[in-house]
Amino acid sequence: MTPLSVLDLSNVTTQTPPSQALQRSVELAQAVERFGYKRYWLAEHHSMASIASSAPDIMIGRIAAATSTIRVGSGGVMLTNHAPLVIAERFKTLEALFPGRIDLGLGRAPGTDQATSYALRRRLDERPGDDFLERLQELMLWESGDFPENHPFRKIQVMPSDAPLPPLWLLGSSDYSAHLSGRIGAGYAFASHFSDHDAVEPMLAYRTAFEPVGDLSEPYSIIAVAAVVAESDEEADRLAKTYDLNWLRRARNMRLPLSSPQEAAAHPWTEQERAYVAQRRGRLFAGSAQSVTARLKDFAYATKADEIMVTSSIFDFDARVRSYELLMDSWKTA
């Protein structure tokens, strides 16, 4: 059976303030661990009113302490926002505290708008252009210790020195990270829940590019999907209206907490708006457990995914938990 996992954004809604959203993440992690999900990843986003998850390393520690078996990781840490040494220290600390349960997923984008990205990096040594590859190489050198003989970093000891860096994953929404993760022998996770690219091409490109130069002996890929599962297709469609209004607002650069299905249904939709969200619905797996399971199995087969990671921005928390439960129950028996 292809494993199922969870990507959590710590959703902020009109009824769930950010601090409560973070507490809900702990509760959700405990629930999906009971249901049998393999891993629980936390996102990094900044200055987004609908997402409270801005410090995944802190949340990883909190959730790992509140659970016992599920793997916990970042989906992902946005490497362009951080000094590689800081990431190495924090994730080696997490690995020392929760050995064998931590994942380090790295993203290339800043996870925010341009002004916030500047604020995050303005005290760092900025370089023009995309410096993700340079930062990734430095992070890997902190683990291997293979800085050149006369390099000033060679004498620095990353503590805790006896804890390894957790397994490395590269996240992507195009084929750039697919090729790169394959070349360095890392795991690969494709964000099909928001990417405009067809998932099949980068997922297969990763497998073709993979070289066993890291800890992995063979390629391992995760496909991330957005899903809304309910007792019926009709109820799932109703819950998914939260997505509809959020997509529309994001397209207009309106950063607001998630709205209820009732508020979304009451929006005065134009034909153009309905067409836009109908197109977006094509990437959302919404329906009964049986219908979503069937679609996911076909998607996993087409992309050759080794694992499926589900994110669910359902307004009502109990309905969100139930969505994950229904999906796993159906998945186990399909």
Image: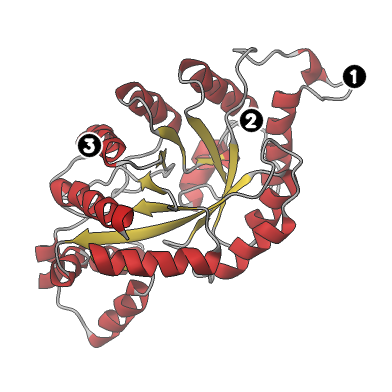
Is residue 256 at all visible to an observer of this figure? no
The residue sitting at 10% across, 71% down in the picture is: 266
Image vertical order of residue 334 relative to residue 33, above or below: below
The residue sitting at 38% across, 26% down in the picture is: 64
The residue sitting at 65% across, 13% down in the picture is: 161
Secondary-structure class at tag 3: helix
Secondary-structure class at tag 2: helix
Point out residue 38 in the picture as x, y percentages from the top left corner: 40, 41
Image vertical order of residue 246 relative to residue 96, above or below: below
Is residue 260 shown left or right of residue 116? left
Q: Which residue is mark 3?
A: 24
Point out residue 71 in the picture as x, y percentages from the top left corner: 43, 33
Q: Which mark is residue 150?
A: 1
Task: Name which of mark 2 and mark 1 comes first in the sequence.
Answer: 2
Point out residue 86 in the picture as x, y percentages from the top left corner: 58, 24
Point out residue 143 in the picture as x, y percentages from the top left corner: 70, 25
287 or 279, nearer to the observer? 287
Q: Tell me the quarter of the picture where residue 132 sits.
A: top right
Q: CA distance from mark 3 to mark 1?
A: 49 Å
The amino acid sitting under disc 1 is: Asn
The amino acid sitting under disc 2 is: Pro
Is residue 192 shown left or right of residue 241? right
Q: Which mark is residue 251?
A: none
Q: Which mark is residue 84?
A: 2
Are the two marked residues, 2 and 1, in contact with CB atoms closer than 8 angstroms?
Answer: no
